[in-house]
Amino acid sequence: MSAPRSLILITVDCLRADHVGFMGYTRPTTPFVESLAADSVIFNNAIAAGAPTYYSFPAIMASRHPLGMGRDVIGLSPDDEPTLATALNQVGYATAAFVAGNPYITHRDGYTEGLDSFQDFLDDDNDEYQEKNNSSTRSRVNQLLRRASNSLGVSSFYEELHFRYSQKLVERSPRTFAQLRRFPSADVIISHASEWLEQRHDSPFFLWLHLMDPHGPYYPPQEALDLMGHGEMTSIRARYLNSCWNRASLSIERCQDIRGEVMSLYDSGIRWVDEQIGALAKRLQSLGMWNDCVFVVTADHGEEFLEHGGRMHTPPSVTEELVHVPLLLRVPSIDRQRINSPFSLLNLAPTLLDCLRVPVPVEFKGRSYWQKIRAGQDWNDEIIVECIAGCRNPARKKDRQGTRVMAVREARYKLVLDFSNRSEQLFDLQNDPEELSPLPRGTEKTARSRLLERARKHIAQAGNTEATKPYVVLSLRNLVAEPGKQA
């Protein structure tokens, strides 16, 4: 069989695995992508190497652990780090990326290397993507009142009063879903991609699309709400729901009351992505390219809806709702498969290059599983997931310098190590897929020991800089960091 010539990689922000039809979700979020599953390779246990975006994409694009270059490198290295794009560009591929306004996937983060064309839809002077300047008299008065309420111990009362007042202002000046949306919708990205594809003729190509529709704040197009049966949702109600969901002080009880509606907005964003992926596939068919492409759909990370008390995806975490992602790989002439073996997105780039018969850079930390996939072989390799605890804003150095949160995951067991409090938790995902009940200490000693040893090896290999060398001792009973050193 001759190798396919081109590659299309679609990454969807915040798309968790259990909200996709081919992963068993019952709501109709992905009917088109589900139709592709009939002749695609489906990975039931695809796992991101980190979360959120800035800890996930180094593995996807450069096959490198997110902390492999220290805590100060957010994104790819400026020193010519090889990537999926550079590997393909070096052998003559036309390369392009269209990224829907994610501020962590830009030229400043090294993601343009190897790409002939790159558009991130970010405009530093555009209020659609930037916070407005809060310098008005009303804003200054609000700030004074907030400080006064904090000093008097009535901050929660003031916050509630201000929130209700703000909602009244919104009702007086309603805006459409399109006006409220923070990122370009998937149809905009697909339109630009289609124009680029029309210029490709005989040369092989690599096209990377990153879609943001499921990302909060959740403002899907009205058409997507209609498709999902939520046509009664108004932009005013959606704005209220998003405002509530973003309130850090909102109680779990009140969040639970609106969780269903918020998830309906999230699911509608996924449905719009699915509609536009279908439109792209149709365009590829009309251009005669569909059966000459490897077509990949995955996500950088998932999204939290209170499963462990969290909302959205900050601060970083390694829970399954954040790191378990969908992965569909359609390769012409390859039969349908469902792979239950754990697969890290660290291995995605080398696997795709191997599929295309393009040399894999020796610097890649992951490895190709293409031959095992073709042979229908199983595996139970241990997957490393890592991030920095409490890193809400990676632009701030102090946020990047926190302690490591790490998971070692295999098919059944998952070990979570939090160096901020030196905790260790082992989960049996077969019997506890929601990670609600860590196994008691002293149980499953063999699995615990195996995963701890894999964690120790990963940390030992992480690097030699002061930022990455952790000096940790791991045992079955404790996690001990040498004083003054980071883990």
Image (spheres, rainbow, N blue to C red):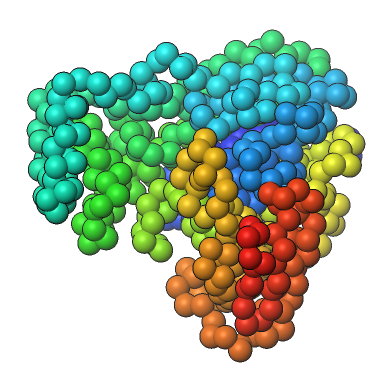
Instruction: Write the residue at 57% across / 73% down.
Output: 424
Quarter of the view holding residue 381 = bottom right
Instruction: Write the residue at 46% across / 55% down.
Output: 25
Q: How many marks?
A: 0
Quadrant of image for the N terminus: top right
Residue 148 visible, this angle? yes
Which is nearer the eye, 368 or 108? 108
Which is nearer the eye, 105 or 457? 457
Point out residue 37 in the picture as x, y percentages from the top left corner: 61, 47
Q: Is residue 101 left or right of residue 269?
A: right
Quarter of the view holding residue 480 = bottom right
Point out residue 254 in the picture as x, y percentages from the top left corner: 21, 57
Q: Is residue 206 above or below residue 351?
A: above
Residue 65 visible, this angle? no
Point out residue 422 in the picture as x, y percentages from the top left corner: 56, 70
Q: Is residue 334 left or right of residue 130?
A: right
Point out residue 88 in the picture as x, y percentages from the top left corner: 81, 28
Q: Is residue 240 above or below residue 51?
A: above
Q: Is residue 257 left or right of residue 95?
A: left
Which is nearer the eye, 69 or 206? 69
Q: Is residue 122 above or below residue 420?
A: above
Instruction: Write the residue at 63% across / 40% down.
Output: 72
Which is nearer the eye, 335 or 475? 475
